[in-house]
Amino acid sequence: MTVAPDFEARRQAVVAAHLKPADQRPASSARGVHHLAMICSDVETTVRFYQDVLGFPLVDVMENRDYPGSTHFFLDIGNDNLLAFFDFPGLGLAEATETLGSVQHVAISVDRPSFEAIKERLDAAGVAYVGPDRGLTDSMYVKDPDGIQIELLAEPLRIMDGRHLG
């Protein structure tokens, strides 16, 4: 893979200014992702996709504390991390677009057997996805019923393209 010279210069500047050797970095103040909160158009469709196709079990459903009548539900994505959704009935929200400040995709680590099982369920359900291909044998991208892009990685946490992150 060829890296454009302007990118490499920008990368080196960020590394020089901000990346400390592992033994010099302070511990993170965070304990992990409590939940990622997104918006769906239909609770039932979203639960079926994430639980039945991707294999992320529904763990709780409650009313949204900030918008009465709105559902707030949580799906288990492993390692005590949750993927959460709201519906906002009656607000007439528009579809999401990829813009600055938006989420481009959510990458979720799965083991190899789960990766293969998810691929089979996507195929059986007729859900389109990209990968694994182009040398990305450990990665595939799928859009949920509302167009949220999910990357499934058959790599452990903190590993990207076989390389340890940090």
Image (spheres, rainbow, N blue to C red):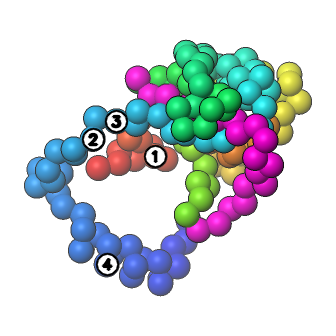
| Cα distance in 3D space between marks 3 and 2 | 6 Å
Q: Tell me which numbered mark, 3 or 1, is placed earlier along the sequence.
A: 3
Mark 4 → mark 1, Cα distance in angstroms:
21 Å
Q: Which residue is mark 3?
A: 32
Q: Residues within 10 Å of mark 3 (few under 14, many from 20)?
A: few
Spot occupied by residue 131 in the image (x, y as percentages of width and height):
71, 43
Q: Which circle, 4 or 3, is nearer the viewer?
A: 3
Local secondary structure at mark 3: loop
Q: Nearer the viewer, mark 4 or mark 1?
A: 4
Q: Considering depth in this image, is 35 or 28 the residue closer to the camera?
A: 35
Instruction: Please identify, in this view, whether the residue under mark 2 or under mark 4 is nearer the observer.
Output: 2
143 on left or right of 106: right
Q: Residue at x 10, y 55 (%)?
A: 24
Of the two numbered discs 2 and 1 in the rendering, the one whose residue sits closer to the viewer: 2
- Main secondary structure of the magenta stretch: loop
Image height of 94 relative to 137, above or below: below
Estimate the spatial distance between the alpha carbons at disc 2 and disc 4, rounded to whole Å.
26 Å
Q: CA distance from mark 3 to mark 1?
A: 18 Å
Residue located at (53% from left, 32% from top): 65
Residues under numbered marks 3 and 1 in contact, where contact means CB atoms less than 8 Å apart? no
Indicate the amino acid at tag 4. Answer: Ala
Residue 30, which numbered label? 2
In this image, 142 relative to 57: left or right? right
Residue 13's label in the rendered image is: 4
Viewer can see residue 116: no
Quadrant location of the N terminus in the rendered image: bottom right
Which residue is identified by label 1?
160
Q: From which residue to which does the magenta span run?
A: 80-100
Q: Amino acid at mark 2?
A: Ala
How many numbered circles are shown?
4
Q: Earlier in the sequence, mark 4 or mark 3?
A: 4
Q: CA distance from mark 4 to mark 3?
A: 28 Å
